[in-house]
Image (cartoon, grey):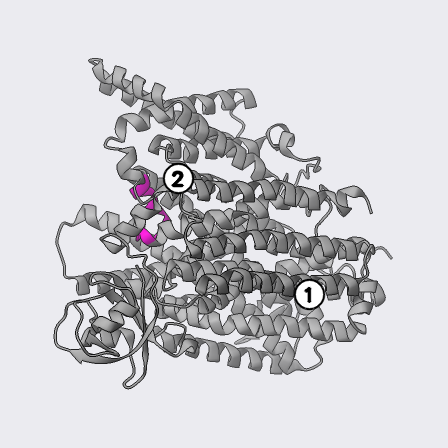
Amino acid sequence: MEQVGEITFHSIGSSTVWIVMIVYFAVIMLFGSYFGRYTRSTTDFFFGGRRFSWWLITMSIVATGVGSHSFVKYSAKGFEHGLSSTMTYINDWFFVPFFLFGWLPIIVYSKVRSIPEYFEKRFSPSSRFIATILLLVYMIGYIGIGFLTLGKAMIPLLPQSFALLGVNLPVTLMGVITVIAVITGIYITFGGQTAVIFTDLLQGFILLFAGLLLFFFGITYLGGFQAFWDLLPVSWRMPLADFNRPPDFNFAGIFWQDGIAGSIGFLFMNQGLLMRFMACKSVNEGRKAAAINILFVLPISAIVVGNAGWVGKAISVVSPETVSPFSSPDQIFVVVANIILSSPIIFGFIMAALTAALMSTVDTLINATSAIFVNDVYRPIKGLLSKKVTSKQVTERRELGVARIASMGITALGVLAVYPFNSFPTVYEAHGYFHSTLTPPLVIAIFFGVFWKKFTPAGVITTFLGGVALMLLGAKYPGVLIAPFDHGITLNPDHPYTYIRALYNIVVCAGVAVLTVWTTGLQHQFVKWVRRLPNTNMIMTTLTSILSIIYTVVIVSFFIDLGTLNLIFTLIVASIIILPLVVNYYVVGYDVETHTKGLVASSIPDARRFFKGSEPNDAEGEKVLVHYKVIEGDVDEIRFSKDDMQTMAANPGDLIYLSDKRKWLGGLKSIHSVYGEPHNENGIAYINEEQKNVGIFAKDKILEAEKEL
Amino acid sequence: MPFSHAWLPYIYLYGVGGLLFGSGLIITIKSGSLDLKRPGHKNWFVVLIFGFIWFMVMHALWNLAALEILSLNVSLLIWIIFMITSLGFIYFGFIKKARS
């Protein structure tokens, strides 16, 4: 009989599995709550106090990365297409130079707390406003994908329905997601970034172990690695997918969607990931964390997340009655784990690790989105509404409260975001579509902002609005507009050009940006001319009204047919010409030198100067080991002996990082400060009571001091 | 195995990706943010180049093994030798030298 549709599963696993999972979650939450006590301010809540070592951040990123590029979706693609499910984990190196020596030092040294804040400093408040909206949509969408994956992972373990007080309640995907969201929301609301980093650190190790354990059991089940390899058809063994076939998994589309848009998106605009790098004790530690993660940890993670699908495929070849080739791809991870792991305790552990990983991703994203809300929505609005000056402590306490409430609201919006993504056949395709569609405008804006000094506020705003308008048009007419970029990929009418649309979106956004910047001179001439006219205000109001009408028509035409492609395209082109004129007229006070100083790659020395507040000291020094002595006073400086200062090649006013010598703490007990005037007691650092408390320095423990700048 | 699956993705990945990677190096060096006169940055430059070759070799050996041009064991052996040699080269040739 021919198989019709996918086979789905319910009630996999025994009560032992649930007990193991509950115990695992309890342990993880206790672990995170313990480190929650290190949260004293919004800086700690969001950035963990900028004190951690590279290895700690690398491992904590594993849980974020593995969770988001989840076991569920890569096992699904591994089951459908084989080892090429790994390709998205092994194509991130191309943008590493841009990140390590462009974006990372800029975000750290310019002391921006969020990506929109960078847009205000680099361009204008209006750029920040639009960037905030786009970024919030991106982040909430990402949270939605995380919740969808979590729900799909949990459903196979649950019954189809259960009885409560005599009422039979069906177990639905949205019901499961809502329950998970409540648990996640509670955790993140009371933890903060330090708790997230340490929870993710533990889970990073557990995840790698759990994934490799599963692979080991899978290979053993199949009779060894050679037997597993031989069972896979040749096309399943290839590391990269076929160039342009099939539409739901092809190399060219995934290269542009993941390797380009996804990689830049992940490295440049994933606020959650950026906050991890900003939690590193220095820029160089952030570079090490990123490089080690991409070079070594991601390839291992690729095996960890995809192997259940490969093993499932091999089992379906040798024993289709055990694993049907028609099994639901999004459920294959749970199905295979249940088959090859005979012990319910190990199965429970693996399932707990999987769901906890997904929760890690989601809680990181919720924390990051909450940071954006506080920084880019709450603070600007509060600044507008109230001029009352409050003490730092009161402000911190209030903002911490807002951050926690925002976390809960964002969690709720994340649940709602599940609905549109649930229409895709697999989580992988939903995520692919999401990346292709939402990342290009911000990716281009950030990228050009960092590496192109001439990029103007008019350029960035036109990229956001004009680029998005052309993207909407492409989504409406994919057969006409995206087809020239399709690399021979067939158009699937249900989900047209899920991945390769990223290329079209990047091209139109970059095209709009370049065109706007190249015509800057003409725009300025126009503005000058208009300002000389008697009816300036009326002209500009008319142009602004025309723009509003055009964008309303474009948005409405996406849902309802209002006209032909040519008409809408002409309107959008008109808007791309008018918008920079309006922006140049209203955005006054933009000065290239002021707005790029320390904010573009060619100006990183200025950024370092700004960070320190004086000329950086790059003289090569050594670390010194010291004991601390608490002295009276509240000045934020640390004093060392003349000899120790000489060893560190440090001068008064330079920046210092003082940490507990025990490497395994990863910088948890540490502080940043400034060198004070030297004294004569070698091996002793003079610190004040507040510094001792912030660094949580233990009595009699040796500290390690090193010059930062 | 058609060329569109065997080698075209590999050529495209490291051709287009290589262009982007190369332009990243050039832009960061020209802008001065990657300053090859500083020993720490010079090490980073080597690490960046190593990373590119690392993935290129990994994918090439994997492809050769999948297409049965090389046996799986030979591919793994070459990769392990490459990994040890290159990591040793980076450590002893650059990082340790820069520290001393």
Q: Quadrant of residue A487?
A: top right
The CA span between labels 2 and 1 is 41 Å
- What is the x, y in percent for residue A199? 45, 72
Q: Indicate the quadrant where residue A38 lies.
A: bottom left
Q: Amino acid at mark 1?
A: Ile
Q: Is residue A502 left or right of residue A8?
A: left
Q: Is residue A295 above or below residue A599?
A: below
Compared across the picture, whether B90 is left or right of A386 comes to right
Of residue B84 and residue A630, the one placed in the foreground of this image is B84
What is the x, y in percent for residue A479?
64, 30
Name the residue carrying label 1: B80
State yes or no: residue A68 in magenta. no
Q: Magenta residues? A: A109-122
User: Can residue A214 be seen from the camera position used here?
Assistant: yes
Q: Residue at x 44, y 40 (%)?
A: B30
Q: Nearer the viewer, residue A704 or A592?
A: A704
Query: In the rendered image, which residue does mark 2 sit on?
Result: A449
Q: In the rendered structure, which amino acid carries the disc numbered 2?
A: Gly
Whether residue A559 is visible, yes or no, is no
The chain carrying label 2 is A
